[in-house]
Image: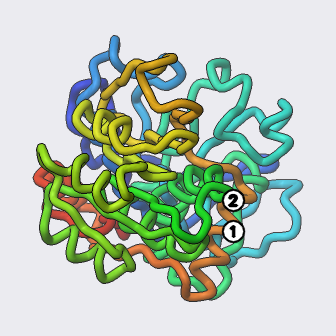
Amino acid sequence: MRALRLNAWGEPPSLVELPTPEPGPGEVLLKIAGAGACHSDIHLMDWSAEQAPPAIAPPFTLGHENTGTIAALGAGVSGWEIGDPVAVYGPWGCGRCRPCRLSAENLCERTGELGGMGGGLGFDGGMADYELVPDQRLLVPLGDLDPIAAAPLTDAGLTPYHAIKAALPLLVPGSTAVVIGVGGLGHMAVQIVGELSPARIVAVDTSEQKLDHARRLGAEEALLSGPETAARIRELTGGIGAELVVDLVGAQPTVELAAAVVRSGGHVSVVGIAGGTVPVGNGTVPFDATFTGPYWGSAVELREVLALAAAGRLRADVETFPLEQAMTAYEKMRAGALVGRAVITP
């Protein structure tokens, strides 16, 4: 089979031929329909060994947003049939610690011992003709959802859903939610806030094209990022600030913007991993404001995201690329030329 492999830190991945895996006891082999391309993959390509998370190491096949159909079942797997369409829950934990038993494998207590954090993150992922999933607990049925359009829901949908859900008690009528960065994750964050709350949505980006996209998806205000953005958001909120700020970029200017526009008692969720930081302490941020760095979400939350999509209330706007053109997708991502999410279709 073909696979897009990251062979070493700091090197571009290469398309290689590998033997098609055979599932062992408890394992499931998927024929991949769609594998979402994520900006975190670019970090994997660019990181040095010193910058990379210690829990993962190359070589491995990229692709952590995966859907497909079951191609083969290992011994002992029950409740699934060959041909079933499924999504793969991305973070692979030990399955035994307390967070894992609560379906929150994104918070597994033993991640550092496992050799990887999930398919495409230390273990072989879905940018290949087939993916070997180590346990049936990591599969979620897709039902009638289009598997290609559903692939990004497993991360680009799940991660902002998890971040926004934590702040829902703040999003009452008259509240404001700011979404910074309305690309692959952000265009879904706009929809999720609109579906789960009555909050006014303010989208912020450096691209007019992406802001137009955010308006079509329900953002009441769409602002170009710049020196006046914080003042404009303060003006829109009567000088009080926003109840929720979701930063899908995480760069220094965006985390500073988030800290500047959150209200007292508000919530900032920094999802992006571009390395920005702000000092958090008494007198440095508004009173009782909370700052979190969410990572993915639980398997139960993935089921909720897929249910929203099945009800027609959430969609990933995707641009597809064959496996041979996967690097073209990443080049467009680096250039900021994608609106929505790129999906690789082996």
Foreground residue, 73 or 150? 150
Spatial distance from mark 2 to mark 1, Cα to Cα? 5 Å
- CB-based contact (under 8 Å), mark 2 and mark 1: yes
Mark 1 residue element: helix
- Circle 1 packing at 10 Å, graded few (<14), some (14-19), many (20+), is some
Q: Residue at x 34, y 17 (%)?
A: 51
What's the residue type where badge 1 is placed? Glu
Please give the name of the residue rendered at 23% of the width and 25% of the height, measured from the top-left corner: 10
Q: Residue 28, percent across and down?
A: 70, 57
Q: Secondary structure at mark 2?
A: helix
Expressed as whole percent of the image width and height from the top left, the position of residue 90 reads 58, 49
Q: Which residue extends farthest front?
A: 238
- Judging by the rendered image, the residue that carries numbered circle 1 is 304
Disc 2 marks which residue? 301
Residue 19 in percent (x, y) is at 48, 49
Q: Is residue 52 left or right of residue 153?
A: left
Q: Left or right: where does residue 79 sit relative to residue 190?
A: right
Q: Residue 80 — which label?
A: none
Looking at the image, can residue 17 be seen?
no
